[in-house]
Image (cartoon, helix red, strand yellow):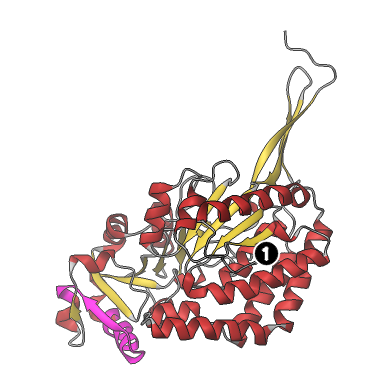
Amino acid sequence: MNVETKPAESAVAIVADLGRRAKAAAVALRNAGTEVKNRALAEAARLIRLEKAAILAANARDIATAQAAGLSAALQDRLLLDDARVEAMARGLDDIVALPDPVGAKIEEWTRPNGLVISRVRVPIGIIGVIYEARPNVTADAGALCIKSGNVVVLRGGSDSFHSSRAIVELLRQSLASARLPQDCVQLVPTTDRAAVGEMLRAMDWLDLIVPRGGRSLIDRVTEESRVPVLRHYDGICHVYVDRDADIAMARDLVANAKMRRVSVCGAAETLLVDRAALDTHLMPVLAKLHELGCEVRGDGEVCRRDPGALPATEKDWRTEYLAPVISVATVDGVEGAIRHIAAYGSQHTETIVTDNRATAERFLGEVDSAIVMHNASTQFADGGEFGLGAEIGISTNRMHARGPVGLVELTTYKNIVRGKGTLRP
């Protein structure tokens, strides 16, 4: 695949060519058996491990460019690959190989009084466009999930991860060829020209679904301009609610992990909610741990009165996805107050409650309307791999089709198969 853009080539011509190739490859992949797809993915995992040095060298070019451009520490962390992250990519492919193939699975079957037997069977969506920023691991995750689910994928990574994504895509394409599948089952848009994104959003004649992953400006643009159906992943304004019946040590450690394990992921906690009845017992042990780890605390009046290290929070803080070592802290009146705050300010991504009171936990789990709701678990588990899905193409905050981590099953639709015996409709 030619990954260098000729100056004379327009975005229109580039995207049209990607579409022609994708449509030609789609038939073979849609009809490929599980063993063939698994063979390609196993080879891709092997090549990623074998070519780790080349991947890291390509990533080093992207990191150097990001540093020169003054990208934030959080964005550089999203972009960075190291030995562990490359191995995690390869392991994610291994996990996808081990998962059941959803294609062809029978969802349900019933018989009508006239003898017709009707079944619904899972099939690939078709051709999927993934538009993303930073995080070159998305290249491997999206490519592998689409191969296993029988979908051709066209990847448009950000300019900041261009060299990393290109190196990974070339390995995926080699692995497809080794399994005698068309290399064009996985393609990378060979230009950083933003006009190519606009062309993809208008490609109704060949694209079946667009999955954007990135900041709000990217998601807003895709949502507003796309004529192709969109599976959205909006902000990760994730909340941890510490209830009056929470174990203090658990609350301290869980909040620290949810916020500080990795601040740049969408499942990182951005707002801490503390039950007013627990302010004098739970608040300072939790905040002391955050301060110790280098986290800036922005609190409401009750929080600032108790924590001299806290800065006053503004209305904007409750709506902010920091992706940085910063957390906003609000006082709420019990679980009902926590539910109200999340409804007012959350992005319907991931929320967790810390409590030993089962009834309180069940109310939170039942009434909070987010894609992922947890009890006594870190929000950083909002991840397809941690859900046992092998990987994810994103965390959907949609209400239609898929919600939460989007894995193999969520990348399929179904068709209705009707079997008769010369059955006529009267």
Using the image as rendered, state which of residue 293 and residue 103 is in the foreground: 103
Q: Is residue 204 visible?
A: yes
Quadrant housing the C terminus:
top right
> What are the residue bounds of the magenta stretch?
282-302
Q: Classify 10 Å Cα crowding around label 1: few (below 14), some (14-19), many (20 and above).
A: many
- Residue 418 image-quadrant placement: top right
Q: Is residue 254 visible?
A: no
Taking the magenta stretch, the answer to whether it contains residue 297 is yes
- Identified at 70% across, 44% down, the residue is 122
Give the vertical position of 151 relative to 157 (above or below).
Answer: above
In percent of width and height, residue 406 lies at: 57, 57
Taking the magenta stretch, the answer to whether it contains residue 176 is no
- Residue 148 image-quadrant placement: bottom right
- Identified at 60% across, 52% down, the residue is 128
Give the vertical position of 225 relative to 361 (above or below).
Answer: above
**Which residue lies under the disc numbered 1?**
144
Using the image as rendered, state which of residue 356 and residue 266 is in the foreground: 266
In percent of width and height, residue 290 lies at: 33, 85
The amino acid on which the numbered mark 1 sits, given as a three-letter code, is: Ala
Quadrant housing the N terminus:
bottom right
Using the image as rendered, state which of residue 110 and residue 124 is in the foreground: 124
